[in-house]
């Protein structure tokens, strides 16, 4: 795994959200999924900025859906995880697993 | 029973127009409107999302513009330093030599502007030609003043005429390069 393949924390989270959402992954759903699972307040701008970076790396692809009335006649932009993205996700997971191996992380009280 | 849809604040939606990329702007506006109407989000939430989104996109464009300005400034510093050395050498020469020297300075600065336009377009990643032309306008307004001191009228005229097109050429090259990739 080269340095360029390594995923940043938020990139990692966004790719995992794409895996969870499958064919229904678009901006709002991705943002909500991340917010629901991480408890973080996430902006739609941050989600799109990350998705565009991942698209530029070839990790995800996007396409435009049909405009719908509940969106004020605007179309959804769907995102899909591509093979290089899946490979980067697996590499990052493996890297974290290796780093965790053999150590016990003490739980701190809040 | 039909539920009355509450509309998000229009000035906030209008602010999304500051995002240059039309496709992205439409997708983000649609996402926000959909969540606002179905998720019972407040006006404050909507405003915060819009401001953060514009900040993300605008921040990237501002960074790219600053980088472009830094490149032009570096070219100007090099050209000015070279002029300090070379001007005394050509001072006693004929007018054609002076003309060639001044023209070379102009060409060098315009080439630097084109390179800066290319790199700005590369950094910003979308609306390349528009951003590089914006760089050209900023450079024209702020960057060239010290080279104009004592410069002939044709030099100043060509600077005004060619700075924005030079920056545009940089952006255009980036667009062509992207299309080929």
Image (cartoon, coloured by chain):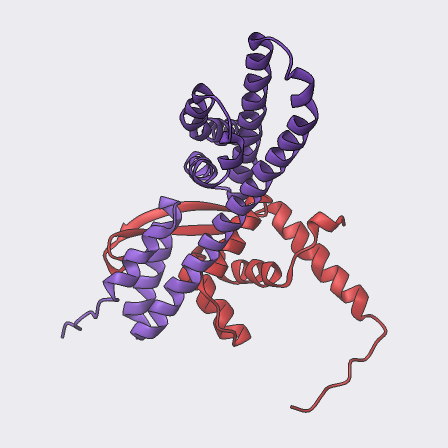
Chain colours: A red, B purple
Single out the residue that lies furthest toward the front. B92
The residue that appears at 56% across and 44% down in the rendered structure is A56
With B179 as the anchor, is B94 left or right in this view? right
Quarter containing the C terminus of chain B: top right
With A40 as the anchor, is A87 left or right in this view? right
On screen, residue B65 above or below B51: above
Residue in the foreground of this view, choosing between A83 and B150? B150
Residue in the foreground of this view, choosing between A106 and B150? B150
Residue in the foreground of this view, choosing between A7 and A85? A7
Horizontal and vertical percent position of residue A12: 62, 60
Residue in the foreground of this view, choosing between A106 and B49? B49
Q: Quadrant of residue B94?
A: top right
Q: Is residue B175 visible?
A: no
The residue that appears at 47% across and 21% down in the rendered structure is B152
Horizontal and vertical percent position of residue B179: 50, 29
The residue that appears at 47% across and 62% down in the rendered structure is A30
Single out the residue that lies furthest toward the bottom. A109
């Amino acid at each position: 795994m080269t340095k360029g393949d390594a995923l940043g924390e938020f990139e990692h989270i966004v790719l995992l959200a794409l895996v969870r959402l499958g064919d229904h992954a678009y901006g709002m759903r991705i943002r909500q999924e991340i917010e629901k699972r991480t408890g973080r307040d996430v902006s739609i701008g941050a989600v799109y900025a990350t998705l565009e970076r991942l698209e530029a790396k070839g990790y995800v692809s996007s396409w435009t859906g049909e405009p719908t009335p509940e969106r004020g006649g605007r179309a959804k932009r769907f995102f899909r995880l591509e093979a290089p993205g899946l490979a980067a996700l697996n590499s990052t997971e493996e890297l974290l697993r290796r780093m965790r191996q053999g150590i016990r992380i003490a739980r701190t009280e809040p | 029973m039909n539920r009355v849809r509450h509309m998000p604040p229009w000035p906030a939606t209008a602010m999304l127009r500051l995002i240059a990329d039309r496709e992205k702007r439409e997708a983000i506006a649609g996402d926000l409107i959909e969540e606002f109407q179905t998720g019972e989000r407040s006006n404050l939430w909507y405003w915060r999302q819009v401001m953060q989104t514009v900040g993300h996109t605008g921040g990237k464009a501002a960074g790219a513009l600053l980088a472009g300005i830094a490149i032009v400034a570096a070219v100007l510093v090099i050209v000015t330093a070279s002029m300090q050395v070379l001007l005394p050498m050509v001072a006693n020469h004929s007018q054609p030599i002076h003309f060639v020297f001044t023209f070379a300075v102009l060409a060098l600065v315009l080439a630097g502007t084109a390179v800066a336009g290319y790199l700005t377009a590369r950094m910003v990643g979308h609306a390349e030609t528009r951003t590089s032309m914006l760089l050209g306008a900023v450079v024209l307004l702020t960057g060239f003043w010290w080279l104009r001191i004592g410069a002939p009228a044709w030099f100043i005229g060509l600077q005004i005429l060619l700075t924005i097109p030079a920056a545009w050429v940089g952006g255009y090259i980036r667009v062509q390069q992207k299309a080929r990739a």
